Amino acid sequence: MNRGRRRALLAINVLVLSGLAACSVPGTAPRLTSTPRFSPQQWLKTDSDHFVEVSQRRIFISLRSLAEKLYRRNPRQWRKTDAGSVEEAVSRIFDVEHGWRFEGLGRRRGIDALHVAFDPSFTGDRVQAFIVGLASMVQTAFGDKVGFYMLNDLDAQHFYNAARNVEIAAWKLATARHQDGRLLLLSNEMGTINNLSFEREFGRVIGILEVLTEVIEHKTERTVVRVVQNMATAVFLPLP
């Protein structure tokens, strides 16, 4: 077998292994740890591919942290389900293959799930609705992928819109109330010692999405349309 044919077969094998690796990722969220550096599927990845994957993992670390924080601040929410603990409720969101479609949310995901989270008449698990909405929206920006090669299918506009939507969701979380004035969900705590840990996690997610916007915009040479909204009247920006 000549050298050119061997190289072609090696490339095909690497692509097959890469596809299998992408399909075998547990749950709907990305792994929290990276694929070993010298595994076959890493051979075709560029530095940009690795950067996008690391960024995705870091976003989901923050989203998972937000889910746990919200459940601990709002224990009544996870107790609406048959989950036995906060940990189990969080695991059901991030560690199960569900396509981000939950029966309790009418199988809504993305912005539609966020609207459920902020509907005062909703009686289900509001934390689940909020986190599922955020996480699935972010995954839509990533093309619902957990492995990246050449970045050809990524759109900087989607990352930009997702960043703005996270900003809007964070503002609504801090302000949305029942008719009697109670917050729909407790998050940051203001008092003698302010607890702003939620804001820090949101800031990390927004910052990473904004960097991804710049990287993909530069790589694809497709200009992003940037908008300015008043938070009090802001609407979620569409993603496909």
Image (tube, rainbow, N blue to C red):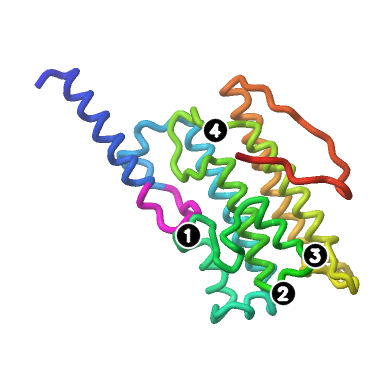
State if disc 1 and disc 2 touch (CB < 8 Å).
no
State if disc 4 and disc 1 touch (CB < 8 Å).
no
Which quadrant: the N terminus?
top left
The three-letter code of the residue at mark 2 reads Asn
**Apparent side of residue 236 relative to residue 58 in the rendered image (left or right):** right
Q: Is mark 2 on a helix, strand or loop?
A: loop
The three-letter code of the residue at mark 3 reads Asn
Residue sitting nearer the eye, 199 or 167: 167
Q: Is residue 232 above or below residue 105?
A: above
Per the rendered image, the range of residues in magenta is 23-34
User: How many C-alpha atoms fall within 10 Å of the one at disc 4: few (<14), some, or many (≥20)?
Assistant: many
**Apparent side of residue 38 relative to residue 168 in the rendered image (left or right):** left
Q: Earlier in the sequence, mark 2 or mark 4?
A: 2
Circle 1 residue: 98
Q: Quadrant of residue 100?
A: bottom right
The three-letter code of the residue at mark 4 reads Leu
Circle 3 residue: 188
State if disc 3 and disc 2 touch (CB < 8 Å).
no
Q: Earlier in the sequence, mark 3 or mark 1?
A: 1
Residue 143 location, x and y as percent? 52, 40
Q: Quadrant of residue 43?
A: top left
Which quadrant: the C terminus?
top right
CA gap, disc 1 and disc 4: 23 Å
Q: Which of marks 1 and 4 is nearer the N terminus?
A: 1
**Apparent side of residue 234 relative to residue 155 in the rendered image (left or right):** right
CA gap, disc 3 and disc 1: 30 Å
